[in-house]
Structures are given as C-alpha cells and as structure tokens.
Amino acid sequence: MSIRDIIVIGASSGGVEALRKLVASLPEDLPASVLVVLHIPPESGSMLPEILARSGPLPARHPSDGEKPERGTIYIAPPDHHMLLGAGEIRLDRGPRENGHRPAIDPLFRTAAAAYGPRVIGVILSGGGDDGSAGLQVIKDRGGLAVVQEPADAVFAFMPSAAMLAVDVDASAPAAALAPLIVEMVSDPAVSVSSVPHAPISKEEGEIGMVEQAKKDEAEPKSRTGESGPTIITCPDCGGTLFDVSRKDLLRYRCHVGHVFSVQSLNAGQKTVIEEALWNAVRMFEERVVLSSRLLKDAEARGLEAVATGFREQVRRARVSAKLIEELLLEHRRAGKGPARAEGSLD
C-alpha cells in the first residue's frame, strides 16, 4: 500500500486566486508532491512560484527537466512548456499544444496517472474551456481520485463544470475548503494498482516526450487505443488530418504531429483560423486596390481608355469585397463575439 502522494492541479482564468486559497491551508509537512499547470501565454513571464510561496508554508518553484519530485514542494509548469511526470522524474517538454495551450493540463494528468496510478489526486480549478477533463478521467481509470472546485465558487465555472460532466468526481468544494479534503485523501492509503479495474493504458497516456511519441504513432495511427481513424476535419494549428481519439464520453481529436483538441477547443481553434483567413482576404483585396489603381493611372496616362475601364472595375470590386468582409468581422466585434482586428474569433 502507498499513500496518495502525487497531487496534480490544473487551472486557467481565475485560477491564481483559487490556487492561493488552496495552498494557504496545506500543511508544512504535507507528505506529497504538488504539481501545478496554469494556462499562461508563452511570451509571458510567470510570478506564480513567488505568489504561491508567499501564500502558504510550502516552497514553490519551476522545476528543472529531469528533477526528482520532492514531497512538501509545489512545482509549477514554466511558460511554453508542458510539465510531464514520469516514474521518479519531472520532464519539461515543448511538444505540440493541447487544447490550444502549452503548458496544458491533460499531459500532466495523464502522465502522472500512467506513472503513479492510484497514488494520484487530480484537481481542477477555475478556468474557461475543458482542458483537464480527459486527463482527470485517466486518473480515475488508473485508480486515482478526482477533485473539483465548486463551479459556483469559481471565477470561471466552465472548466470545473466540464470536469464534473465528464468525470465521476470524488469531491468538490470551494477553493478555500479544498486543502482539508486533499490532506484527508493523502492520509488514506491508496489501493493497489492490481485491484483497480481500468481501461488499458494507451501510448498517449503513457508518453514522456510527446513529439517523439507522435512521430512513432504516425506510421500506424489507428493503433492508438480508442482511435477510430482519420476524419475530414483538419488541425487548426498545422493543417494536418485530425484523428478521432475519443474515449468513453470524451470527444477528442489528435493530428499526427501531436496537437490535441477537445470538441470545445477545436471549435475555438476553427473560429480563430476562420477570422485570420478573412482578415487575410481583406488585406489581399486592399493590396489589389493599390496595384489596380497604379495600373489604372498608367493606362489613363497612355490614353488607353478601354484598358483603364477594366482596371477601374477591378478597383471598385476589390473595394466592395474588402468592405463587405470587414463589415462582417466588425459586426461580430460590435456584438461582443470577438475582440479587435486580427486578434479575436468569429462565432
């Protein structure tokens, strides 16, 4: 028997405050390692280790690649790196984004489950989207426990709500009340791996070094557990074919490069790609106006009225097309369904 000494936590928007409340009540002698993924833009610095170290008694830091996790320490995924957990080591990986994020929650959760099985406690806090739900299900399948912040207590309820819909969670509570629940779970001996019925673990769940694993899978993509083959949908990040890697009630897609999407994150990714394509169309029409105007001016200077008429019509059509597309994009912005030019997304 082993205690549940691996605590993995996923958070996104609104997650900093939830994390502060949670770690504030963790004991100084906590006999478990705590690993945290917070969605953060790749170009941003992260002050989260300093924030969490000031919020409670446990030290917090970004780990080094290959570092052995120690009990009583909080490890935070650094920007633009997935944090993975192997047997006895933390790995930092700049592999493909999952659900549009790097770091993403699912890679940490599923690798922790693969390496430590029932010794893992998975926690989902405030956030948008549904990153972490698939990984939390893997933790449950391997005999671990699933804990969720009460959606009503979260600044953004989407992520904990998605987890509760997808997974039979073991406990939910406001962020400030999660620490006592987790400490109680840590103190209970974990059941042995052999006594836990679970689905066979897939290559994806056990991977350490996701890029390398994805390349191995590329030769025989249908060999992955639960995969039903290629779809007609393409990856928003790289344009490759997406394969259906759904398991149980969790619909998920993965391209051969390794980008992974839930249905929700795939929908968001497609909207971003559509908007970028439309702004590119506006740009190209505006460039056509410039070029055709120069040709028009040259034709007029040469007295070629028939040629000038053709270029004049090209200028008119390009301006109309650019205006129509831009009005469509700006209408979505005014409706509150997309931010400023080239930065938002369309519904």
Image (cartoon, rainbow, N blue to C red):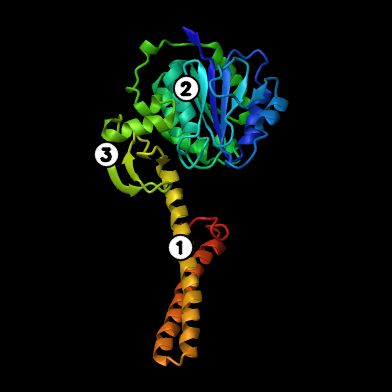
Q: Residues within 10 Å of mark 1 (few under 14, many from 20)?
A: some
* Nearer the observer, 180 or 328: 328
Which label is found at residue 265?
none
Image mark count:
3
Residue 238 as seen in the image, left or right of residue 11: left
Which label is found at residue 229?
3
Q: Secondary structure at mark 3?
A: strand
Q: Secondary structure at mark 2?
A: helix
Q: What residue occupies the far front of the structure in this picture?
A: 302
Q: CB atoms at circles 3 and 2 under 8 Å apart?
A: no
Distance from disc 1 to disc 2, alpha carbons, whole Å, reads: 41 Å
Residue at 39% across / 23% down in the picture? Answer: 141
Residue at 57% across / 30% down in the picture? Answer: 77
Residue 96 as seen in the image, left or right of residue 62: left
* Nearer the observer, 93 or 40: 93
Residue at 50% across / 80% down in the picture? Answer: 294
The amino acid on which the numbered mark 2 sits, given as a three-letter code, is Ala
The amino acid on which the numbered mark 3 sits, given as a three-letter code, is Gly
Q: Position of residue 345 (x, y in %)?
A: 50, 55
Q: Which residue is mark 1?
A: 278
The amino acid on which the numbered mark 1 sits, given as a three-letter code, is Leu
Q: Which residue is mark 2?
A: 112
Q: Position of residue 75 (x, y in %)?
A: 60, 24
Q: Secondary structure at mark 1?
A: helix
Distance from disc 1 to disc 3, alpha carbons, whole Å, reads: 31 Å
Q: Position of residue 137 (x, y in %)?
A: 42, 28
Is 300 drawn above or below residue 233 in the view shown?
below
* Labels 1 and 2: the sequence-earlier one: 2
